[in-house]
Amino acid sequence: MSELREWLRRHNLEQYADAFEANDIGIDILPELSERDLEQLGLSLGNRRRLLKAVAGRAAEAASPQQESPVQAAGEAERRQVTVLFCDMVGSTALSNAIDPELLGGVIRRYQDAAAGAIGRFGGFVAKFMGDGVLAYFGFPRAFEDAAERAVRAAINILAEVGGIELPDGSRARARIGIATGLVVGEIVDFGTAQERTIVGDTPNLAARLQALAEPDMILISEATQSLLGGLFHLESTGTHELKGFAHPVPAWRVLGEAAVESRFAAIRTGTLPLVGRAQEMGLMLERWRLARLGEGQIVTVVGEAGIGKSRAIEALQEDVAHEPHTRIHLQCSPYHRDSMLYPIIQHLARAAGFAPADSAGARIDKLRTIFARRAATDETAVPLLADLLSIPAEAPPAQLSLTPAQRKAATIALLVDEIVHLGESDPVLLVLEDAHWIDPTTLELMTRLADSISEARLLVLVTARPDFAAPWLTRPQATVLTLNRLSRAECARLVAHVPAAHGLQAETVAAIVAKTDGVPLFVEELTKSVVESAGEDSAAVPATLKDSLMARLDRLDEAREVAQIAAVIGRQFAFSVLAAIAARDGAALDAALDKLVAAGIVLPEGRGLERGFSFKHALVRDAAYESLLLGRRREWHERIARALEQSFPGTVANEPELLAIISLRPDRLLRPATTACAPVTVP
C-alpha cells in the first residue's frame, strides 16, 4: 500500500486514492493543493474540509513533533517573544447586507478554514475566531526558531487560499493581515472542560492596528518583525503611522512576496564578519577541494550546533576558490518542505533555468532544454522527466512518462546524479547542500546515490547539518566529517572587535560578552550588536534575534523545562543538592529531568568530589530560561532558594554571603539574572 493511500485510509478518505494517483499526486504535494484542486478531483465539500484539516495537522506535527503534549501546564504564565498574526476578511459587513445569513455563514466558514489551514501548515496556533477575524500566535504555546518567518509565510498562503473562494456575486474573497512581534505574557487558562491560550501585551493590539491599516490583499508587519526577517522577503517601507493606543508613530512594512534566495544564511545575515579561528577547518576543506579537482571526488559533512558558523565556513571556502574555474551548485533545504520531494533540486533548477513568473509552459521547457542541452540531445526522456519534476504541464505527455511514480522517481534521481557527475568533465564542481537536518527523504536518497558515484569525479560536495543529522554516506572512503567546535575566548574577543560600532566598548564589556556567548559566533555577533544598540540600557538581556531560537530549545524539553527554569535562578552552575532541596520532585523524577537536559545539550554534568553538579552549556540559554519566568514567579524561586541555603547549607552562606544577598534581591531588581549567582553553589 502506498504512503498516500495509507494516509488517506487513516483519515477515512481512501475512496479518493485512485483519483489522486491517476493525477500523479503524492503525499509530498498534498499541502500545495488548493480547495479548487480538490473540487476538480471530485471531493465533496465536507471531505474537502476534512482533508485540508488533516493536511494542516500533519504539517503542524512535522514542524513540531512534540506538539501533542503542551509545554505549559494550565494556570502557568510565562514571558515570551511571540509573533502575532491578525487576519480580517474584506467587505464582510457589506456582504452580510447583501446575501442570506446561511450563505454568509458558509462563506465565513470557508474563509476560516483557509486561514486556519495556512496557519497550521506553518506551526501557528489559532487562538480565536472573531466572526471574520482570525487571531493566531507563532511562538506560543510552543516556540520556533523562525516564528516571524513562519507567520509571514502563513500570511502569504492565507491571501492565496482566500483568493480562491468565490463569493455569491461571482467575485473573489479578499483579506488584509497585520503581523507584529514583541514581548508578551502567555498563559494557558483552564475552564474545566476546555483550555484557552491567551497572551497579554501590546503585540496583539499592534497586529490588529496594522491589519486595520492594511489595504485589501495586503500584509503589513511591525518593525520588530521586519528586523527578524533579513532578506527572506521583499519588503517595502510604508513610513510611520499614528495608531490608536500607541503614543508614538509606528513604522510598518508591506510584504511584497517571498525573495528568491539561494542561501538562507545569506538572506538572514546582514553583513558578513571576517572568519575567525577556523584555519584548521578551512585547510581541510581546501585539501578536499584539491583532491576533487584532480578527479578524486569528495563529500564533506560539516556538523555543528545552530550558530556555530557552518554556513560562514562554506561561504569562506567559496570566496577562496572564486578565482578558480569551476561550476557551483547550491541546494538549500527548507524546514517547511521536509515532505516535498526533491524540493532543493527543484528550487535550484528553477533558478538555473531562469524561470520567470510570466513564462509559459513552452518557454520553461525551452529553458530546460538549454541548460540540459547535452542530455537532451542523447536522451529524449530527460526533458520530460525534468518537466514533470518541475510540474510544467505538457500538451501531450510522452509514453515513457506512463511509468509508475516509483519508476519515475528512480529515473529522475538517476538522471540528476548522472548530470551532476558529468558536469565535472569541463570544470570541477562545488556542490553545497545546506541544512541537511531539514532534508526530504528523496533528496537524501539522491545525495546518497551521488556520494556513491563521485569517487572518480571532479566534484566536491559540502553538506551542512546540525548534530542530530545522521548522514548515510559517512562510511564511504571519500566521505569526511568536519565538526565545528566553539571559538576560544581570544577568538571571540577578535570577533567582537569586528562588529560595527563595537570599537568603543570597554574591555570589561567585551569580557562579559565573551563570557556569556560561550564561543558561539552567532551569539557573539548578536549580543555585541544588542549591547551597542542598547547603549548599556539592558545589555544583559537576551537579544531579540536569539530569543525564539533559545526558547525553541527549551520548549523541546517538555516537563523538564521547569527544572531548567529553577536551575537558571540558582545560577549558571548549580549543585544537585541545592536543586533537589527546592524542586518539588522526588529523586527519580528529578534525575530523569536532568538526564533529559543533559541529553538535549542544555546542561553539562560537573563533578566536584562527592558532590554532583551541573552547568548550563550556554549562558544565553540559561538567561532565556530565567527571562521566561514571570516576575512573581522569580520572586518565589529566589525566596525558596534563599531559605534553602539558610536552613540546609549554612557552610555556603558563611563562605559566600554575597550569593545569599544576590539570591534575595528585591523583585524589582529581578529583570535579569544576577551575575554573582553564576558562581557555583558548593556544599561543604
Image (cartoon, rainbow, N blue to C red):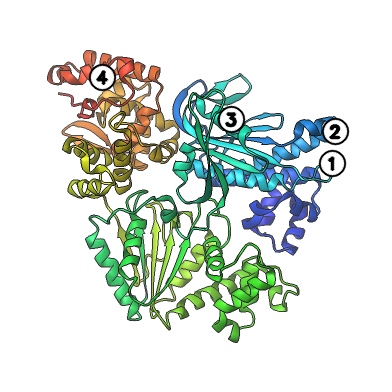
Q: Amino acid at mark 3?
A: Arg
Asked whether disc 2 touches disc 3, contact meaning CB atoms under 8 Å apart, the reply is no
**Mark 4, residue position:** 663
Q: Earlier in the sequence, mark 3 or mark 4?
A: 3
* Place of residue 410 in the rendered image (x, y in percent of width and height, measured from the top left): 58, 71
Cα–Cα span, label 2 and label 3? 27 Å
Q: Residue at x 45, y 65 (%)?
A: 330
SS of the residue at dot 3? Answer: helix
The reply, left or right, for residue 277 in relation to residue 354 is left
Q: Amino acid at mark 2?
A: Ala
Q: Residue furthest right?
A: 100
Is disc 2 surrounded by few (<14), some (14 to 19) or many (20+) residues within 10 Å? Answer: few
Position of the N terminus, as image quadrant, is bottom right
Asked whether disc 2 touches disc 1, contact meaning CB atoms under 8 Å apart, the reply is yes
SS of the residue at dot 1? Answer: loop
Asked whether disc 3 touches disc 4, contact meaning CB atoms under 8 Å apart, the reply is no
Position of the C terminus, as image quadrant, is top left
The reply, left or right, for residue 647 in relation to residue 131 is left
- Is 680 or 92 nearer to us in this picture? 92
Q: Amino acid at mark 4?
A: Ile
Q: Nearer the viewer, mark 1 or mark 4?
A: 1
SS of the residue at dot 2? Answer: helix
Q: Earlier in the sequence, mark 2 or mark 4?
A: 2
Cα–Cα span, label 1 and label 4? 65 Å
Asked whether disc 1 touches disc 3, contact meaning CB atoms under 8 Å apart, the reply is no
Tag shown at residue 98: 2
